[in-house]
Amino acid sequence: MEDSGNDFEVRWYRTPLQKETLRSLTRRTDFEGFLQVVGFLLVIAATAAAVWIAWGRTPWYVLTVLLILHGTCVAFTLNGFHELIHGTVFKTKWLNALFLRVYSFISWNNHVAFRASHNKHHLNTLHPPHDLEVVLPIQLTPAGFLLTAVIDFIGLYGVFRDMAVLSLGIVRGKWQLILFPPSNRKGRHRLIWNARLTLLGHAAIIAVSAVTGFWQLAVVTSFARFYAGGLQWLCNTTQHIGLQDNVADFRLCCRTIRLNPVLQFLYFHMNFHTEHHMYASVPCYHLARLRREILRDMPPAPRLLPAWGQILGILGRQKRDPAYQYVMPLPPSPVV
């Protein structure tokens, strides 16, 4: 890696691929994009409809189960939003842009902020201060997980506060100020107006719910991101936690896990996280094939629960030795 003044470049190791293979893997189709993106929206529409029908008509425990199911599915909207940020899902650019805004709104995410941050994250993964999107070590608490898994009041407050501050035209926070300095007027303008439109949209939904008395409308839309997010948290948090920073090999700083087909679909195939970082131009629906192409050069991929067993062991050792970082086992020799 090189660092000269403001220039910083990580010379990443990538498993070699034949040009024809890479060209095939990076090919995008609107059909596959619709299957993933619209298919996911149909899933959350179906769970929302189930909640709406059950509201006031079924025992509380039936409604609770349906709310958990809906919140669990909606939580993965974050991963769809992430994929659309990459612009790799649809062949048609305007479709990608359209659904990015839909997913951005549902998940209360500012796509202007995240695109700027995520570009840096991929270029300089776990190389602070050039990547502050993910910074190791990641600290976890049982209370934090329980909030996410039940009702995340703190997350709701934090998202609303940050959106409100941005809506007032105030850009703050170390990472945001790096990404959007005062000289970046156009970027700041888009950042601020995205926050304003998101707040106005959700405020309108909540107002309609209050006026009509149909509170289930707000519960299945504006508030859905903030309850029953435990399963998505368990999947998403595995991506980098406990691994090495300041290394130029995605196999050492990213973690791939194996999931069943249903959960892999909901997670937008981000269980193949090492592969995603190594070849970020590959659409999410081709990542399983990419994994097969480079399998002999990759570390083993555990299933979700064994991965968490490993992670908890790493975190326990880091409490005793804060400098400890787990080194992924790599194949004995590089691919030639």
Image (cartoon, rainbow, N blue to C red):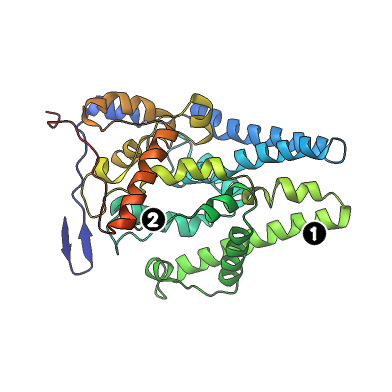
Residue at the location (46% across, 44% down)? 236
Q: How far across and down, in percent of the image, does residue 332 sit?
A: 13, 31
Q: How far across and down, in percent of the image, does residue 26 sit?
A: 35, 32
Instruction: Please tell me whether mark 2 sits on a helix, a strand or a loop.
Output: loop
Q: Amino acid at mark 1?
A: Ala
Q: Is residue 94 shown to the viewer in this render?
A: no
Residue at the location (45% across, 65% down)? 187
Q: What residue is pinned by disc 2?
A: 138
The N terminus, quarter of image? bottom left
Q: How far across and down, in percent of the image, does residue 259 sit?
A: 45, 29
| Left or right: residue 131 compared with residue 10 | right
Residue at the location (71% across, 41% down)? 67
Instruction: Locate residue 321: give its quadrant.
Output: bottom left
Q: Are marks 1 and 2 in contact (CB under 8 Å)?
A: no
Residue at the location (70% across, 35% down)? 47
Q: Amino acid at mark 2?
A: Ile
